[in-house]
Amino acid sequence: DAGVIQSPRHEVTEMGQEVTLRCKPISGHNSLFWYRQTMMRGLELLIYFNNNVPIDDSGMPEDRFSAKMPNASFSTLKIQPSEPRDSAVYFCASNIDRGLGYGYTFGSGTRLTVV
Amino acid sequence: SQKIEQNSEALNIQEGKTATLTCNYTNYSPAYLQWYRQDPGRGPVFLLLIRENEKEKRKERLKVTFDTTLKQSLFHITASQPADSATYLCALDNNAGNMLTFGGGTRLMVKP
């Protein structure tokens, strides 16, 4: 398995533009997570999907952020409109949720810079 | 308020020594605690999981302890090597199943 695949690796965009980040989880994993990492705030959970259904989106900063998981092999995180304070590394992770706790597999992240 | 605290200062040790990293938490009731390694420019990599009913877990040169009374986990790397230099993150659930909250991480530097 190629692991969790995120694209793009780097994104530079102007304030006000729409940004779409993409994630392909590991085949067979039924849970998917989007995290954001900054120096100031560390790793923050944005949203959690289980079996393609959003379970907890309480970490989504505001209405400018939205996430979808149309099928088990693809998820997107969209920011519209983007702002400089959205600059961060965005990670996607997946795992198998069987109620016993399993480690996450993270992607390599998307480094977003909003200028 | 809920907190997961890891030493934000870098830990510098000599090759061959044992590195010990600490993770303290407040106002959580975790069913399990996990440790991850993160290298610059990469995503975190899962290392070990320890459950609330386990006191200690080992994997090769790694050892994790979990004290739910002290609300603390210790992560040990024995016979440390320069290749162990990285940031180490602890993470725990809040009895909420599959969602993890991460600590801020501790950077470990192993000098040859």
Image: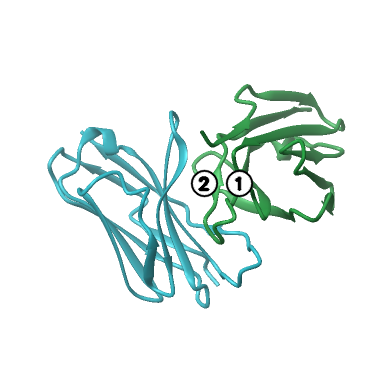
User: What residue does disc 1 label?
Assistant: B91
User: Which colour denotes chain B?
Assistant: green
Chain for mark 1?
B
Dot 1 or dot 2, earlier in sequence = 2
Horizontal side of B105 relative to B51 (left or right) equals: left
For label 2, count other residues whose C-alpha is less than 10 Å away and answer few (under 14), some (14-19) or many (20+).
some
Horizontal side of A22 relative to B78 (left or right) equals: left
Q: Is residue A52 above or below residue B1?
A: below
User: Which colour denotes chain A?
Assistant: cyan
In the rendered image, the quadrant that contains the C terminus of chain A is top left
> Which of the 4 image quadrants contains residue B12?
top right
Horizontal side of B58 relative to A9 (left or right) equals: right
Q: Position of residue A20 (x, y in %)?
A: 25, 56
Chain for mark 2?
B
Count how many numbered circles sit on residues in the image. 2
Q: Of the residues shown, which amino acid type is indicated by label 2?
A: Arg
Q: Position of residue A81 (x, y in %)?
A: 15, 45
Discs 1, 2 touching: Cβ within 8 Å: no
The residue positioned 65% from the left and 24% from the top of the image is B10
User: What residue does disc 2 label?
Assistant: B42
The residue positioned 79% from the left and 32% from the top of the image is B19
Q: Nearer the viewer, residue A41 or A25?
A: A41
Q: Are marks 1 and 2 on the same chain?
A: yes
**Secondary structure at numbered mark 2:** loop
Q: Of the residues shown, which amino acid type is indicated by label 1?
A: Ala
For label 1, count other residues whose C-alpha is less than 10 Å away and answer few (under 14), some (14-19) or many (20+).
many
Q: Is residue A23 above or below residue A87?
A: below
> Which of the 4 image quadrants contains residue B80?
top right
